[in-house]
Every structure is written in C-alpha cells, then in structure tokens.
Image (spheres, grey):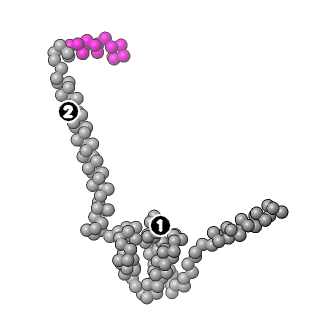
Amino acid sequence: MRRWLAAAVLGMSLAGVTKAAIDTYQFRDDAERERYQQLTKELRCPKCQNQDIADSNAPIAADLRREIFRMLGQGQSNEQIIEFMVDRYGDFVRYKPALSGRTWLLWFGPGILLGAGFVVLAVIVRRRRGAAAQVRDELSGEERRRLAKLLEKDPTHD
C-alpha cells in the first residue's frame, strides 16, 4: 500500500513538469506559418542565450513568439520584425548579426586571430632554425673534429 501511495504522490508532483508550453496559433496560410517558423528559429532567446526562441521554454521566448505572431498578423515583413527585435534586445538576439561597424570584430575576429597565430608560429620557427644554424657555424675546427670523431664511434649512428 505504501508503494502505491508513494507512486501516486510522485505522479502528482511530476504532473506539473510534464506540461510544456505549446503555441497554438492560427495562420492565414502555410507561407505565414513558414515565415513564423523561420523567424523563431533565426532569433536567439535573450534568457537562454544558446537556444532559439522556437525551442526555448523561457517566458520571454513565449512573449517573443507571441510578438512575432502579432507582427505577422499586422503584415510586417521579416526585416521589420527582425529590426524591431534588434532595436529592443540588441544584435545579440540574432544568431547571424548583420555586418556593421559594431559587429565587424565578431565576423572577422576569429580569422584575424588565426592569421596572427600563423604569423607568430612562422616567426618562432624561423628564429629556431636561425639559432640552430648559428650554433652549428660557431663550432671551432677542433670542436668539429671532436664532434665528427664522437659521431663515428656512436654505435647507434649509421
């Protein structure tokens, strides 16, 4: 009997967790439904940060989905809706921010850092090669003869 009671209590406590927010909007046509889905996939949830508003269960994501639906109903274009969201939440709300003076580092920064890394690597390799050649050239005649003699006696060297 205790097990049944525990199972019933557990089931009742999980009942609230299983409720997921499902948006049920009536669209005029399939094109509008597709625009809605595209916009909700393209915009990032301000709270979740790594989730689009279509997949987020955050209350703000639900508000943004409702706002997008309202703006679509008013006949606004995708650009107008995205511009409204960017004005309200900043460039962060877009997964692919537009190229502008404020976002050029975001777009080109990784390439610049990668190029700088290759340049630093090339400089290090050149310096090491130069240092090795300089050490080789700095041996005196006696040191070279001793080195040659040691290398000839080395049984591991053929």
Answer yes or no: do the residues labelled 1 and 2 have beta carbons within 8 Å? no
Identify the amino acid type marked 1.
Cys
Tag 2's secondary structure? helix
Residue 8 vertical placement versus 33 (above, below): above
Question: In x, y percent, where is residue 71?
Answer: 43, 84
Horizontal and vertical percent for residue 97?
35, 69
- Residue 29: x and y in percent read 51, 84
Give the label on residue 16, or none.
none
Quadrant in the rendering for residue 145? top left
Task: Compare residues 109 and 33 and report the one nearer the observer.
Answer: 109
Q: Quadrant of the C terminus?
A: top left
Q: Is residue 65 visible?
A: no
Instruction: Estimate how packed mark 1 is, as few (under 14), some (14 to 19) or many (20 or more) residues with alpha carbons within 10 Å.
Output: some
Identify whether 81 is placed above or below 118: below
Query: What amino acid type is highlighted by mark number 2?
Result: Gly
Q: Earlier in the sequence, mark 1 or mark 2?
A: 1
Distance from Cα at disc 1 to Cα at disc 2: 52 Å
x 31%, y 11%: residue:
153
Residue annotated with mark 1: 48
First to last magenta residue range: 145-158
Residue 43, percent from left and from top: 43, 72
Q: Quadrant of residue 126?
A: top left
Identify the residue at image location x=81%, y=61%: 2
Q: Main secondary structure of the magenta part?
A: helix
Residue occupied by mark 2: 130
